[in-house]
Image (cartoon, coloured by chain):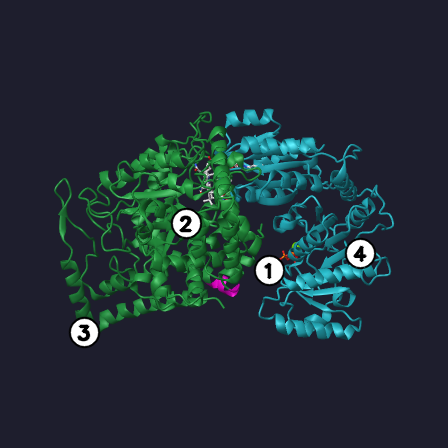
Chain colours: A cyan, B green
Amino acid sequence: MAVALNPRRAAHPARAPRVPLRILTAVPICDGHDSAVTTINIELARHGIEVIYLGYHQSVSAIARAAVQEDVNVVGLSSYNGGHIIFFKEVADQLRHSGNGDIPVFGGGGGTITKADERIMRRQGTDRIFFAGTPLKDIMTIIQRDYARTAKPNAKFKGDRSLARAITLVEQNLSARRPPRVIPARRQGRGFVVGIAGPGGAGKSTLIDELTSRFLRQHPTGRIAILANDPSHPDTGGAILGDRVSAIYAQDDRVFFRSLATRGSLTGLSAATPAAIGILQQSGEFDLILVESVGVGQESDPFGSFGQSRRLTDAVLFVLAPHYGGLIQLQKIALLNGADLVALNKCDHPMARTAQAEIQARLNQNGRGQVLHSTTAARHFDPGVDALFAAIQALGSARGRTGGAR
Amino acid sequence: MSQLGKIADSVDRYNRFVAAEVARARSDRKFAAELRARWAALRASVTMTRSPTGTPLPRLALPDTDEPGAIAEYLFGQGFPGQFPYATAAYREMYLDHETGTGEEPMRLFAGLGLAEDTNARFKYLSRHQKSLRLSTAFDGPTLYGLDSDHAGVLGKVGEGGVAIDTVEDMGRLFAGFDLTRKDASVSMTMNAPAPVILAMFIAAAKRRFGAGCVPNLRGTIQADMLKEVQAQNEVIFPVDASLRFLCDMIEWCVPNMPRWYPVSISGYHIAEAGATPVQQAAFTLSNGFTYAGLLQARGADINAFGPRLSFFLDCSLDVEYLVLGRVCRRIWAIGLRDVFGAGPKAQILKLHTQTSGRSLIAAEFQNNLTRTAVELMLAYMNYTNSCHSNSADEPFTTPTEKYALLASHGQSILLEESGLFKHTMNLFGGAPGLLALERQVEQRILSVFREMDTLGGVIAAMEQRYQRSQIQESGHRIETQIYSGERPVIGLNKYVSDEPMPSVPLARTSPKKQRLQVERLRAFKRRHAKTAPAALQRLAHVARGGGNVFAELVDTVEVCSLGQITACLADVVGKFRPMV
Ligand code: B12
Ligand SMILES: Nc1nc2c(ncn2[C@@H]2O[C@H](COP(=O)(O)OP(=O)(O)OP(=O)(O)O)[C@@H](O)[C@H]2O)c(=O)[nH]1
Ligand SMILES: [Mg+2]
């Protein structure tokens, strides 16, 4: 039944640290059957794989775009509402036509995908179908056996894929404890880089998405990049990187979105982040680059706001929600001193009024003229987010970067 | 904050009340005498019948006791059928005397495939044997997501898994030839985010056929339960607050204008099929129901007006808890509505539709699915569900083909009409010690989920924290690991497996030709209304922006606009839903 895992690796678990496989999973358009894919996601992460989950009801172009930007080893589709023969073909075609045909597509859909369908689908570019009743263990074994590949530089890659591959190479070298091949060059270029930190669940990702929508609306031709850091599982090394699910405005070719797993780094950022920022900056493509750190504690300083070394980003936005505890906790949050911009999010919450006053008072102590932005990111068209976006742009121009304002 | 803690407390309080009444029955002579007299009268009201082999039987089975404590226990704890707290049943008599022609069949088969005329033909096929007209509509993916059949990239899904409906004209074709104004006609629609648009099309199509006066006679159910969409079924288009507003607009319009219509079906089916345990299913579904009741009350609606128009929909699978799930839900709902929401008797009754579990049906040796469904049907009817859908054995592969849909329908007929289990005597099983023990356990576990959600701030706050979704996903993952470790036996999959190759089953798929035909029809409709549609959409946007009742406007908009046009217009006003993992 089960295919044996690579025996050498099993015998030497402490050998060279593994470079995690990266898989993009998604459910096709007009389909909300996500129970299978969420089960597969959990299982993949348990097996040390990094899953970039795009969500359900996803179009061919959203899937292809994500596969390219995330530079995944393989795309896994879970389809139940029919039309799979066409849909899988269109994903494979779109990848191939954009010069990314090296990314295979596989998937499943229980009994709705028949053996006869599979024969057609394989002819039309689908790599493999996992039929109903395939034990999870077999699925994992096959994936680890057939889709683990070392990423190599490829001069043929164009556009977002070449950026994505450069980032992958940095990640891969770091994971393999090799010195990074790409030395982050001095950051230059016009893009304004903003680091976004704050406690877990404060609304960083939601805010970033709302800022993205402002950017796209106000700059009809510019591009924005987002680096979303999320923690790897400390034991398995796998991760479910789900930020793309909620990033509804990232579904646009003018947005470059890359999910980064921390892979053991405890700073709140993947060790590849500095180089990734450098790569994006050097490309000269982006007017605004937003970097989300994982949820941080009171003393964290993921973007180096205080240290002697160069700051990692042009500016730091600290986001918090009204549930920070109380005045004492507020005093202890170091980034409230270091941040250039501070946003109190979830202002729809009843505790927000008190929080606003407390935080503004805390900022006044710093004597840096920091203004508190009150936002409700969960609401579209929130004027607080408008003001925050304007402040980011103003800061960008003041620092001599475009920040999108051309 | 949330009412869930209060509701859990009210159920506990009620249980203490029952215990106290039992004790009083045993100590207070006067009370004991009253109870005995009441009991005697109730018993006397039960008439006798006979089985075909001559065995005399009561039409209602009651505990065989004269002991006042036991009487109190039954009357207050379980409730005489049709009486508070409704654990036994919503009504005094159900399923009896099928042949003699009283009552409507509980069978209600969910169907939808291809274009409107294909589903219409399927409806005719399935309702051939029915006395009353009970239709239930499945829509295809694009319709469920509010997209037109000509939307980029959806052509392959048109007519798959349900019927494609883009316009009021499709709706007309869907029900052609059925007299929807008949007293015993009832139409159900599994439609959620775009429910207000689809119901408006239904009303508009009915008005075209039967005249404007038909609206109050229209009877049926539209699912429209947006909370469980966010939690489990994933058909959400607009942000949560806007989705709930559109739903409440529709309910408020329907209550006075369509008094026979159920404008929401609060559903656990999708929650369970996504992987939830029976207890999670019941807890999330009931708490969603209480949330709607609270929202509508907060908008000023009268619980006694809208309460009776709320309906419920549960899954029934093979886990033992399903023996009692419907009973326990009816009881908690009744107590909560009475004691926390102040509702009168009509609003306290949880009206239940049940569907057997699709997820329990598997591809390997799929004929076994007939047996699985039969067992589930038995459990569903033991819970006195008001209506029931039975899945077809070809469920894992395809929209049911005629052959298996018919077998599924016959399964219900065999249980209710051929077998004597439900025909002669109401409540043959209620009150069995095993059931009672299970009911108590299940009820307590549901209440503890309520309390947990209460600490999170209630249903909507819990939802924002991904509570329901992560619970459901975890349970779903557990089921699959249990199956593949063998801990959960599945015959033909991990136990008693034969070498039979995967069968090749006939499929009900929609041909590309039909899919293109649907697009042509839609485009013709859009062309015909190209002049009038923009103004209609503007009026709709105006109402949506101004906070008026969107549903009242939609009934006019659908005359000239397609589903996709309307969805896009509303999304411009309220924005799009931001999904969660
Ligand atoms: C659960 C379920 C639901 C749940 C979904 C809950 C959720 N959030 O996922 C609910 C009740 C909400 C639902 C709703 C609907 N459903 Co449904 N549903 C099912 C059901 C019963 C099981 C699917 C499932 O999750 N199985 C569990 C998984 C883990 O196992 P599996 O499918 O065997 O998959 C295995 C492999 O294929 C593999 N695999 C699967 N995907 C992937 C992906 C990758 C990357 C990998 C590596 C492996 C892999 O992993 C599994 C392990 O071996 C099927 C019927 C059935 N019995 O299969 C119908 C079914 C898929 N549904 C169907 C339909 C029509 C619908 C609706 C459109 C009905 C309607 N008209 O309203 C809606 C649409 C909902 C939506 N938003 O899109 C049809 C599809 C028909 C068709 N294609 O012709 C089916 C086949 C039922 C039927 N016969 O009518 N459904
Ligand atoms: N009520 C309310 N909820 C919000 C708001 N902004 C975000 N949320 C919700 O808060 C939850 C967490 O939001 P995220 O954007 O994922 O928060 P995050 O800071 O990125 O979280 P991590 O990356 O896990 O640290 C989600 O359920 C959001 O929908 C807001 O303004 N008001
Ligand atoms: Mg985040």
Q: Are marks 3 and 1 in contact (CB under 8 Å)?
A: no
Measure how far apart labels 3 and 2 are at the Cα level.
55 Å
Camera-nearest residue between B572 and B529: B529
What's the residue type where badge 1 is placed?
A: Arg
Q: Which mark is residue B199?
A: 2
Measure how far apart labels 3 and 4 are at the Cα level.
83 Å
Determine the residue positioned at 70% across, 63% down. Answer: A387
Q: Chain of mark 3?
A: B
What's the residue type where badge 3 is placed?
A: Lys
Residue indicated by mark 3: B30
Q: Specify start and end residues of the magenta stretch as a single range.
A: B451-457
| Discs 3/1, front | 1
Residue B345: in sight, yes or no? yes
Secondary element type, mark 3: helix
Q: Chain of mark 4?
A: A
Check disc 2: other Cα within 10 Å, few if <14, some if 14-19, many if 20+. Answer: many
Secondary element type, mark 1: loop
Q: Which mark is residue A379?
A: 1
- Ligand 1 has an atom within 8 Å of the beta carbon of the residue at disc 3: no
- Ligand 2 has an atom within 8 Å of the beta carbon of the residue at disc 1: yes
Q: Which mark is residue A313?
A: 4
Q: Position of residue B160 (x, y in %)?
A: 47, 36
